[in-house]
Amino acid sequence: MRGWLVIFAKAPEPGQVKTRLSPPFSPAEAAGLYRCLLLDVLDESSLAAAALGCEAVIAVDPPGAAAEIVSHAPAGFRAIAQGVGELGARMIHVARQAAAAGAPFALLRGSDSPCLDRKSLREAAIALAQADLVVCPDSDGGYNLVGLGARALARGPGGGLFDHPMSTPAVLRDTLARAEQLRLRTHLIPQGFDIDRFDDLRWLAAARRRNEAIPCRRTLAFLDEGRLWPPEGASRSSLYSGP
């Protein structure tokens, strides 16, 4: 059986994605950025899945958007529903599907982490040979990738591994605490970031300065063409003074 590489994806509809970017982005700009992020992530994840011999899976919300999203993805992806409820419940739902299919491991990633590349995904998969749970932390206290080995797939979904609030600065700490309770061996790979707020674009700008080959050409082009980057030296609060 093959491991699963799962991308959590939403339909890129204005007002439904990346709402914390608005303002200063308009809802249409936020949706446009998310669409580029998603397409870039699908491209890089497709290459990673092929290199790792994984099944490439898109976990879609809402389910009715599956056909549209898959039509824009590289060949080889299949879609499943994320399920219902908060993010933690949906992660549990997807992990249970991977376990039921007999997958020896599952890598779950978001669709808004433009610098999470195939090298990091490979590192996570290799680490699962020794660890039960592999996590790539975010700069905001969360994480953008979680790898579940066979023991984590067997124990975690029913053991409350993700049964805690997911949109807080304590997400990583809470997940690691649940893993310790379940006696899962954990491993952290080097920190990354995702794009949730306007200021998070500074992380992307810095990554671009360090490495022009980062795998998100559509995202970079969208921000360049729309002149949507944060001005250097200005904070989000100084750019927007509304409520």
Image (cartoon, grey):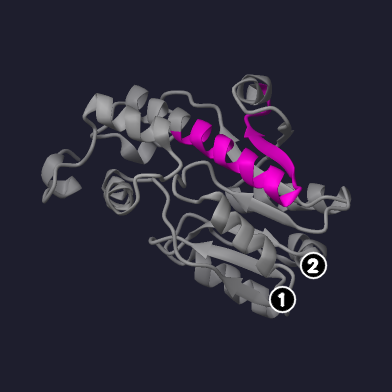
Measured along the vertical axis of the image, is residue 58 above or below residue 64? below
The part of the chain drawn in magenta is: 37-64
Looking at numbered disc 2 in the image, what kind of residue is underneath it?
Answer: Arg
Write down the quadrant of residue 99 in the picture. Answer: bottom right
Q: Secondary structure at mark 2?
A: helix
Magenta segment's dominant SS is helix
Q: Say whether residue 122 is left or right of residue 171.
A: right
State the residue at coordinates (35%, 41%): 20
Q: Please rate how many residues cluster around mark 2, counting C-alpha atoms within 10 Å: few if below 14, some from 14 to 19, many from 20.
A: some
- Residue 40 colored in magenta in the image: yes
Q: Say whether residue 13 is left or right of residue 236.
A: right
Mark 2 → mark 1, Cα distance in angstroms: 9 Å
Is any atom of residue 75 visible in this view?
yes
| Residue 194 rendering spot, x and y as whole percentages | 42, 50
Looking at numbered disc 1 in the image, what kind of residue is underneath it?
Answer: Leu
- The residue where tag 1 is placed is 184
| Residue 166 rendering spot, x and y as whole percentages | 53, 56
Q: Secondary structure at mark 1?
A: loop
Pointer 2 or 1: first along the chain: 2
- The residue where tag 2 is placed is 155
